[in-house]
Image (cartoon, rainbow, N blue to C red):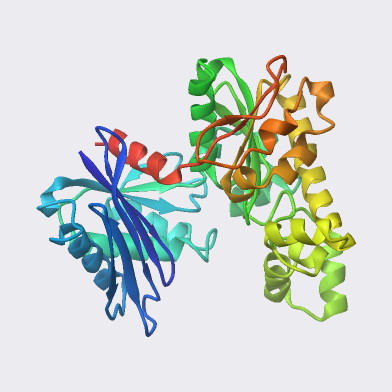
Amino acid sequence: MKILVINAGSSSLKYQLFDMETEKVLAKGGCERIGISGSLLKAKGNGSEKVYEQDMPNHKVAIKLVLDALLDKEIGVIKSMKEIGAVGHRVVASGEYFKKATLVTPEVMKTLEEKTFELGPLHNPAAATGVRACLDVMQGTPMVLVFDTSFHSTMPPKAFLYGINYDDYKKYSVRKYGAHGTSHKYVSQTAAKFLGKKPEELKIVTCHLGNGSSISAVDGGICVDTSMGFTPLAGVLMGTRSGDVDASAVEFLARKKGLNHADMVTYLNKQCGVAGISGVSSDFRDLCAGAEGGNERCRLALDMFAYQTKKFIGSYAAVMGGLDCIVFTAGIGENTPTVRADVCHGLEFLGVKFDDKANDVKNDGSIRVLSTKDSKVTVLVIPTNEELVIARETAELL
């Protein structure tokens, strides 16, 4: 069976086509500038690449172009649309309405569009647009929604509730939902397989560290806590996001800066984080270079990021009553040795013995062990593969 995975943005659309018998990627690419002048599709397949420069006024036209690329005589990998068994769509926010991957029906689309848009205003409307486009162009092909938040739906109330009035939680569904669930699921399961253990036997902290970062506690294969909250603004400070900030400090800043609620949320999402602390960049490569060159604010931004990540690891070890494995993944987690070292140094009391030489080896896309052989806690780098999780969960529903 072949599964097409779609990740639709407001003006973009990324895709991958999987052969589920081998879990191999047959083709992939992305549409850029949908609804904007200069739109194009960059497609890879059959060992070749091709760029389609074509007007894409909407996602429906973009989907048609993607299918044309998959059928293309030069880079195409299928001979008929019928070879695509289903389409899996990445959706960021599920609220409390969807606990797992869900087959699309008219009722499901109604709930998605009427109930979840306000929970994921930047991402969910774009995802729904992508689903609608596929329904129009690929009639009869099953569509599946796979949610970033699903893996975190196993958190107990003591972990996901805020200390607000309980009636307001019930009325407005204000609680922790988390994010990056497909990544945390993939790397925790892959870690167990790599270690030759069943997920049920392990206590793992997964660190998805990128421009957006989240840390999760995975106890026995089940997520019991995660650092992001009602939105992806919570947790550790990130590229441009503040992470956790006292709500009263937010109100104080808004008054001092003359910002309304919406502008203040934009400020916390776009003008803070390591970019705001360093005054240099949200890119950790720039921060590392700055710190090496003596820039104290770059050093401070790196120190804050590592410190906050370390705090979550320690607290999650306490919550789970132990720790067997720490996993680093995503752009920073996979490619920034300085951050990994700063996070792991000082965790010896938990049984972590960090191997600095192994840590300095350049990322080659493989799973790597960063702890010594006698370390009680195994430290791993595992490249994430969120698209494969979406494909797997889609196939499981058919």
Q: Is residue 127 left or right of 168 when viewed as pictured?
A: left
Q: Is residue 304 above or below residue 187?
A: below
Name the quadrant containing residue 139: bottom left
Q: Kindly tell me whether residue 273 is visible in this rendering.
A: no
Residue at point 27% right, 79% down? 54
Measuring from the top left, give residue 172's x and y in whole percent.
Answer: 60, 54
Seen in the image, is 267 located left or right of residue 23? right
Q: Quadrant of the C terminus?
A: top left
Q: Is residue 200 visible?
A: yes
**Label total for image:** 0
Residue 301 position in % (x across, y down): 81, 56
Residue at 41% x, 52% y: name it. Answer: 90
- Nearer-the-camera pick, 46 or 164: 46
* Residue lying furthest bottom: 37
In the depicted view, which residue is nearer to us: 57 or 55? Answer: 55
Residue in the foreground of this view, choosing between 216 and 19: 19
Quick one: quadrant of the N terminus? Answer: top left
* Image point (77%, 78%), residue name: 259
Q: Is residue 126 left or right of residue 211?
A: left
Identify the image quadrant of residue 127: bottom left
Counting from the top left corner in percent of width and height, residue 118 is at 53, 63
**Residue that appears at 34% across and 56% down:** 15
